[in-house]
Amino acid sequence: MDQELVERARSGDQDAFADLVRQVSDTLLGVARRIVRDPGLAEDVLQNALLTIWRKLPRLRDTEHFEGWAFRILVRACYADAPRNRRWASNVHELLVEPVSGVDDIQKVSDREELEQAFRRLPLDQRAVFVLHHHVGLPLVAVAETLGIPDGTARSRLHYATRTLRAAFDEARASDIELRQGRPA
Amino acid sequence: MNSERDFDQVAAEWLNEGSDATPPRLIEAVLLAVRSTPQERGFGIPWRIQSMSHFAYVATVVAVLAVVVAAAFYAFSRGPSVGPGPTPCNGPGPTPSIGVLPSPGQMPRALGPVPSGWTTYTSPQYGFTVAHPTDWSVRPAERAWDLARDVADCRSPAMDDFIAPGGDLRVSIWSLPVDGDLQLTPDGTSYGLGRIEPWIQAYCDKAGRSACAGFLNGAVALCIEARDCHPGLLVGVVAPFDQDVQAFFTGGHYGDRMVIVTVWHTADDPILAPYGGGRQLIEGFLGSMCVTTVDARRDFPC
């Protein structure tokens, strides 16, 4: 992250903020999209988060922590916007757009569908930890620091999220095996 | 096929699918909104005086001098009951002998936004992390705070003291278990305030504070971790109230302990004017501890 850019934006330089937005928006949108599971809602979340980042930038003391601070604001925007939005819990199939053929492809789609539905049942705080750890690649300690939660809480949320997804995956696989075994050769 | 590896692979593919490219119209909308959206001030008075204009610099110096004169007048106009020195709870008190400090407590670090011009401190006694103005000094607690021993002693050495330059302004922070001599009530009301108000009332009674009966007048509900909103209460922000501004909060990062933050002055004491008053000063401390008001919790990054 360009520290000078952050510093200039913090001082009220709108051009610097514009450059900053272009640098970070894709990453932030990716995180929002994976947490709220709805592209339109993710854009709303990102828009709100970017405006909050602009307003609160003068309060950011250490510019080298900008990215983590921005993640925290984004996640809070997810928490705030997701439950209020009417589109919440809709579009279950929205991400599955590729045509499929063959047993393996169908199984792959089935696996992802199960993961998608299981993930949507997770609380937002578990989703946030899962996405920051597995998608962004932050170590759990950094996830905890970013979200302002104890390390143990982050570990616990990741554990429950992974366990839920794993159970859904295993269940889908078991159903698939039963289906294949019952199918005539 | 290895099921574990299969799961990891499928989960990774599922998690990474799709495009993350931000639509240009979204960026344009944000930048358009930014034009008419003012940034929030860092905190209190401008700390970076070198960036001020000559006129603003002179005005600030005059204002600070006026506050100093007003504070002196206020102190000397309190009459004989005040005595020649500061009131009992004002000022830094004697310098304690600092022995070997205990290792930090179990309370996890919970660091919220740090106001511009402030620095952070982690309590060796209690383990919490808090920000304070950079030019203030810190006097760490010498021992754990004890209800029977310390409740009526506003100069107890069991508090972490934060002392402004000149020594006349002090903020203290300490904590105690909520399941000790004072017990939280089991059921909560909105934001859990129903659990902690009786606790604060009992604490206030034990402390023998003169304004306990009216401590809820003008009280402000607080949240630890804005989303979960573990309960807290800020009292004394409507002056005149006893002698100080106090915040009580428990839960979340702070587990089964009640944390108390106290500005040892009434909210409108002129000595607090450079910091925007008692409420703004204590909110600077609270914000850095991931505590905010219920009203402001929506945008709070904790």
Image (tube, coloured by chain):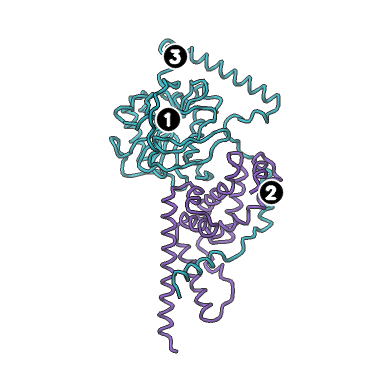
For the residue pair B77 and A184, the one nearer the viewer reads as: A184
Separation (CA) of disc 3 from disc 1: 23 Å
| Amino acid at dot 3 | Gly
Residue A85 versus residue B16: which sits nearer the camera?
Answer: B16
Q: Which chain is cyan?
A: B
Image coords of residue B297 (percent x, y): 50, 43
Mark 3 secondary-structure assignment = loop
Is circle 1 on the same chain as circle 2? no
Above or below for B74 versus B209: above
Q: Is the C-beta separation of discs 3 and 1 under 8 Å?
A: no
Return the residue found at the far front: B100
Residues at marks 1 and 2, CA–CA distance in whole angstroms: 44 Å
Label 2 packing within 10 angstroms: few (<14), some (14-19), many (20+): some
In the structure shown, which secondary structural element does the residue marked by tag 2 occupy? Answer: helix
Task: Provide residue A64's location: percent of width, then percent of height.
Answer: 59, 44
Q: Position of residue B75 (x, y in %)?
A: 48, 15
Q: How far is disc 2 from disc 3 in space, using C-alphas?
A: 55 Å
Question: Relative to B252, is A68 on the left or the right?
Answer: right
* Image depth: mark 1 or mark 2 in front: 1
What is the chain letter for disc 2? A
Q: Write down the residue under mark 3.
A: B85
Q: Chain A: give its colour.
A: purple
In which chain is the residue bearing label 1? Answer: B
Residue with the mark numbered 1? B140
Which residue type carries mark 1?
A: Pro
Which disc is residue A18 wearing?
2
- Chain that bears disc 3: B
| Horizontal relation, residue B189 to residue A17: left or right | left
* Residue nearer the viewer, B153 or B213: B153
